[in-house]
Each structure stands twice: as structure tokens, then as C-alpha cells.
Amino acid sequence: MTTALVLGGGFCGLLTATVLSKYFDVVKVIERSARHKSVPQQHHIHVLQVKGLQVIEQLIPGIQAEMLEAGAIKVRWTQDTTILLSGGTIIPRIDVGIYSLALSRHALEAVIYKQVTQLAKVEFLFRSRVDYLQQEGSKIMAVQMTNLNSHESQMLACDFIADCTGRQSKSLNWLQQLGYQKPQVTEINAFLGYESRFYRVAEGYDMGSLGIAVQPLSQVLPNLCQFRMLRIVLSIVSLFPRFMVFGRIIALFTTIKCLSFPIIMSFLAMLYAILIQCMVKA
């Protein structure tokens, strides 16, 4: 009987377990928390890109219907979104047959988790931690796992290991402990950050579209790349600055270090939002 281990039960781990269940007799997902803990960006706008939606539907047939039932919003980007270019031009809204789903990160993972738990070959080991790898010859044959509740340890034999723990991964350290040379790591700072703020839409107010995408005037906010709004219960406005100097640009919803003037930028952002709504409505 073949066994695959998936380290991490988040979005990546869930989809990885789905794929591995087609090739292994048993797939065990090892997750440190009682359930996969939230990700830092889960409160920001999340949109499942078109290709991503298609791939997940191929892996888990019927998942799209489950997402819609969970509250996802179907967005036809070229028809349901008002796009305003920096020169003042509004792109004509037409339906080209391309759509995706907008839903929270929590809802996305909850729907996928529900489907994966129904796979007979997949088993979840919550509140568990992998301590190190056991090697026999040139192959990794097992891992030592500790139950964080009972603090008991055991060896889990396996034929395949997929590390889906993200930035918390310890795989390189484990391999180095086994005598393998640690590869050189190259880090590139993209200087990209994003901020979100919730706006309550006035009763009876019609935005005219599900979403608004705006390219701001470069002379007004030169480092602001994109401005989006989706009408999902409360409208959410996300700001995507090119550099982190606009941290905490519109209130205290995040704790990104600010290198500029947060109060001044906050007022500018709010005034800009009002201006955009007026332009679109007109």
C-alpha cells in the first residue's frame, strides 16, 4: 500500500491532497492547528482567477456550484465591472463569455475542505507537527510526527512527501541535517503591498456595476497602481500601492509600517473614493 504525506492543510495542501489521492492508496494531511489557521490577507478582496477556477473545477467536479451556494458572486469582468482609465476613458462593458467568482478566502478554503474530506483516501491529522525526516539509503522513507495535544511522537512511513507549509517550511533545514547542501536562496523585494477599507453602501444607492476598477491620475497619487471596489454586502475598496510607503493609508485596518503621512493620505484616499463614485455615476 502506497502512502503520501502532505505537510500543511491550507489551500495548497488541500488541492495537493486531491491530486495525490488519484495516485496513492492513502494520503495523510498533517496540519499544526485544529483546522487550517487563517492567512494574513484573508480580510482583503479575494477573486478566484478564471484559470484557477477552471483548474479547481477539473480537480473537484461540481466545486463551482458549491462555491456559489456558499455565497460566491459570479463576475463577468468585461460586463459587470466599470473600468475607468487614467485619461478619463470608461471602457465599454461587453460580455465576452469570461467570468470568475469573488468570495472570501475563508469561504473558498471551507468549500474545498468540505469536498476533500469526502475523499475516501484522504486522512487529516490535526494538531500535529513534523519534526524531522528519516532517510534510508538515498531515499526519505518516513517522518517523525508529534501530536501537539498528547505530545506523543511516532514515525510515519511514506512513499512521497509534499511540503505545502509555505513560508514556514523547514524542508531545507531537514535536508541539510541529512547532509545535503542547502541551496542558495535569492530573495527579490517586489515592493508591493495592498490595503483595504470597508465602506457601507447607502441604502438604495446603485453603483451601476458589481465592481469598479480605476487607474488614478499619476500626478495625484503617483505610487497608486489600482483602485477596486466590489459590491459584496459591504463594498470593499482595495488600494495597491507600488511601494510600502502608503502603509495604513486609510485607517487602522492593518499594521504595515508607514513611512509617509498616514492621516493626510487617509483623507486623500477617501476624497479620491468619493470623486471616483461621482465620476462613475455621472
Image (cartoon, rainbow, N blue to C red):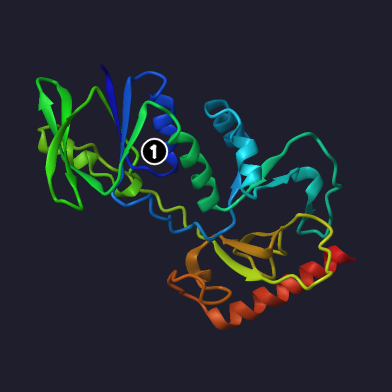
The answer to whether one can see residue 181 in this image is no
| 169 up-or-down from 5: above or below | below
Q: Quadrant of residue 204?
A: bottom right
Residue closer to the observer: 229 or 121: 121
Judge from the rendering whether residue 6 lies leftward or rightward of residue 179; answer left or right. right
- Residue drawn at point x = 80 percent, y = 59 percent: 87
Write the residue at 85% across / 42% down: 94
Q: Position of residue 52 (x, y in %)?
A: 57, 36
Q: Quadrant of residue 210?
A: bottom right
Q: Provide the secondary structure element on which disc 1 rests.
A: helix
Image quadrant occupied by the N terminus = top left
* Residue at far right of view: 282
Q: Amino acid at mark 1?
A: Gly
Q: Nearer the viewer, residue 179 or 124?
A: 124
Residue 241: where, in percent of width, then height?
Answer: 57, 62
Q: Is residue 256 above or below residue 191?
A: below
Give x and y (percent) for residue 264.
Answer: 60, 82
Query: Where does label 1 land, which residue?
Result: 13
Give left or right: position of 191 versus 66. Answer: left
Q: Is residue 114 visible?
A: yes
Return the residue found at the far bottom.
263
How many numbered callouts? Answer: 1
At a point 63% along the width and 36% down the height, the residue shown is 64
Who's the residue at 66% across and 43% down the image?
A: 68
The C terminus sits in image quarter: bottom right
Locate residue 113, reporting x and y percent.
46, 41
| Mark 1 surroundings within 10 Å by alpha-carbon count, few (fewer than 14), some (14 through 19), many (20 or more) | many
Horizontally, residue 175 falls left or right of residue 106, namely left
Relative to 173, say whether 213 is above or below. below
Near-viewer residue (102 or 167): 102
